[in-house]
Amino acid sequence: MKTLWKRTPPVMALVLGLAMVAVACGGTETVTETVVVTSIVTETEVVTEEVVVTSIVTETEVVTETEVVTEEVEVVVTEEVVVTETVEVMVDDSEARTLRIAIADDVEQLDPALGSAQLTNLVLKNVYMQPVQYRPGPDVGGFSYADTTSFEGQWIESWDFSDDFRTITLKLRQNLTFPTSGNPVTADDAIYTINRALATGPAGPAWVWGNIGVTSIDQIERVDDRTLVVHDARPSTIVLPLMRDQTMGIMDSVTIQANSTEDDPWGRDWLKQNYAGNGRYVVDSWERGSRMVLKRNPTWTGFQPYFETVELLTVPEAANRLALLQSGDVDIALDLSVQQLATAATSDGVKVLSVPDRNGINVLLNNQAPPFDNVTLRKAMSYAVDYNAIVNGVLNGQAVPSQGPISVNSRFFDLYNLEDAWIYEHDPDRARQLMAEAGYADGFEFEMVIRQNVPLDEAVATNLKAQFADLGIDMSIRPVTGAEMFDHLFGLTYGGMAFRGGLLDYVDDPYYQFFLWWDSQDAAINWTGFADARIDEILDETASVVSDPGRREPYREAVTRLVDAAPMLWLANANYTLAMREDIGGFTLHPDGLLWFATLNRSG
Amino acid sequence: MTTIVPPRERWLVGRILVGPTAGITVRRSLFFLMLFLAVIGPWIETIGQWIPIPVYDPLRPDPFNPVSPPSAEHWFGTDTLGLDIFTRVIVATRVDFTLALIGVTLGGGLGCLAGAWASYRRGWVDVVALRIVEVVQSFPVLLLGIALFAALGPLEIFGPVDNGMAVLVIAISMVNFPLYLRQVRSVLLPLTEAEFVQAAKCAGLGAWGIVWHHFIPNARGQILALFPLTCAYAIQIIAGLSFIGLGIEPPNPEWGSMIKTGATLIVQGHWWVSVFPGAFIVLSVYSLTGFSARSETLVGPGGTSA
């Protein structure tokens, strides 16, 4: 007995070491470790040979977790069972199957009909199931683009358009259930979801359904348990691309109705905090402001995502997100600045994916107020911009110069041969000449509105200010809050220019772009106040044309007219950038830029 | 009519600034250096053409050279936009000093008058003045600044004056008003019944005449001791508000906003973006507080000369 007591310190040391291994190594260790532990508990002589333990702990440098281990040692001395439990964690590979992502803000809410911030949309897309999604395209060097011409059914299994594209028959996928309630997914859920969308509009899914042509629930016919028919749909090229929208997730009608009240018949308040979907991932827990945990959907019988758990950790400071990525505590860090991405790219164990994308870095001009109601002056500004300084300086080469409203990285840019529509380059002499023609030979003053505390906004604005100053233009910069910015944009109350980096059309299609931005009557975001009767005509003429040969010439004309009128400064198409650990693979870029977890894996 | 000001207190400001002293030579040198930088700030580029120091346009970014460390070309390095930090900390000196000076003078001046008036009139005037002081002082300084920017920021009521700068001056004035009011009131309260005040009243001098000619001069020592301290405090307030994005319009140089630019870069090892503007704040505050000590040495309690 006395000998045993003498040996207690080595036993404790051993258990401490092993516990540290358990904590530090997580699930990456194998069963062989279990054997060693069992023998150590019963035979204390094995203590000194565990050199490996120390080295592993040193490599991982998880200081805070060491403190936890100390507490575990005290338990182990009195109760050996605890040690066994710790070891059991080691054989589990849940750590490797957990994807940790550092995000900048908390998710706003969980109602697909209300999402707006990019991060919220990202989560809604993954935790709700849309009618269809894009198929991943071929691997193009460690990542792939979604194939925007090819769709796979999600909650619908198949779809069939009538010859005139006005009737769509939707077949629902069989044997789907909502994992949190166990309720089966039925045609009634689909009708409830569409009805709820239309009733809670006009934004979100009501807007999407409206553009598909569905404005009344009477247009949806329930043929049987698995079949729905959409009547009087609007023929267009974007019906299926709209059906993949993150707002289109099917909802558990039974659960939502059970949580609805007389004052809130569609359960909107309940759904802000709660979850009633069946995406590839389901919401497991949500600690507001700090952490959301998603689990792989156990009821999905198709292709299984690699990661069983996705943890979204709210880390407001970008520098901290970068530090967590560098230390390996998270696998992906979202929303890093250009400089931080450059730092990440040189860090051990970290890679930065930089993928050509349609992301617009644009400056909006107020076309309805002086001085930029003058088209000649707008063109002068387009010649005054040093595009190279923005693309290769401010954006550190992670972009290409823009060439008009349709991104150079859109498949339609080449398809419609839009290269020759672009006329602008950095030409200060031409800018001066046009300024003189516009009656501003001696320069002028105006104000640019930017978002507060957004490094990209400040960088672009500061550079443009210096470039314009060379032409005698005095540009002042006014940072405003995000809400104020929206007020200015929708109310057209900004003085001269407003900068909005990161403008991305969720659907890569010229029709989508034009009815969103340039329809003088109905554009959802006509933030420049631009109006052109001929462009309106072209839009009306091509709205129902569902083949690209028929749209090519009209859209070439529309783009040429738009470029010539210069309603905004198209500066650059920025790459989609994502900083992640080196062992993360399977990334697929969707046109909406919303990270799709289902294809990600740990391949390194 | 004479004031109760001993002859030795003439030239008091001059003696504080340049008079012989043993203790504050270093601080005083620093202060004059800062003052010199504040004066030459706007012409720094021109000066750079005459003497070989690497100065640049403080508003012209070099997007191809962001976050470069201190070097012969950029003594203090460059920030995230490629702006030269050495040039910008010098140019910012005038901005910070001027705003602090105007704000403190305005708020302090009004505070002195109100304090002297309250101590002379007493009664409800005194009560109202003190309640106003308590209300203003009950707000934390930054919160007060944020509220002012939220209320006055979008109004554009200051004409050609930069809106952000005008609100900063108002914020500093509001912070300083109660400080001076309390200080002056506490010093002058015992003088209300003094013989020279009674004499002045008998001589037919009006209330404002008594306050202006007899009360305020007696608080001059305290005011002069408080002034550099509150200027130093004001510089910190300006930097603090700019740090959270309020005040000076970007990309105009200001120490607080410059620190903010570099705050998130420190963990990546890019220390120079924040450290140099931070050092200038420390040095300016350090230099200013020296004069407060000097004033206290020269002026004894109760406003008489030591």
Image (tube, helix red, strand yellow):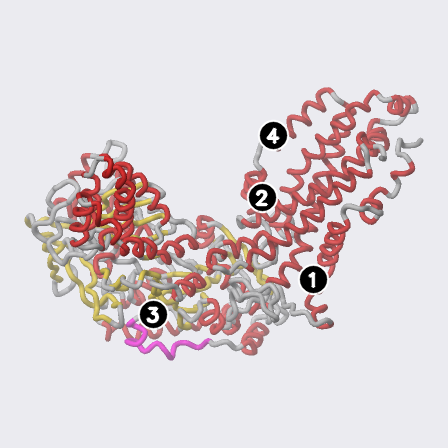
Percent x, y of residue A547: 21, 71
Tags 4 and 2 in contact by the CB under 8 Å rule? Answer: no
Q: Quadrant of residue B209?
A: top right
Label 2 packing within 10 angstroms: few (<14), some (14-19), many (20+): some
Residue shown at 78% from the left, 42% from the top: B294
Q: Nearer the viewer, mark 3 or mark 2?
A: 3
Q: Main secondary structure of the magenta part?
A: helix
Residue hosting label 1 = B42
Tag 2 subunit: B
Q: Is B44 within the magenta?
A: no
Residue type of the residue flagged with mark 3: Pro
Tag 1 subunit: B
Q: Is residue B292 above or below residue B60?
A: above
Residue hosting label 4 = B135
**What span is in magenta?**
A411-424
Give me the C-alpha separation between circle 3 and circle 1.
43 Å
Please tell me whether mark 1 sits on a helix, a strand or a loop. Answer: helix
Label 3 packing within 10 angstroms: few (<14), some (14-19), many (20+): some
Tags 3 and 2 in contact by the CB under 8 Å rule? Answer: no
Residue hosting label 2 = B152
Residue hosting label 3 = A356
Tags 3 and 1 in contact by the CB under 8 Å rule? Answer: no
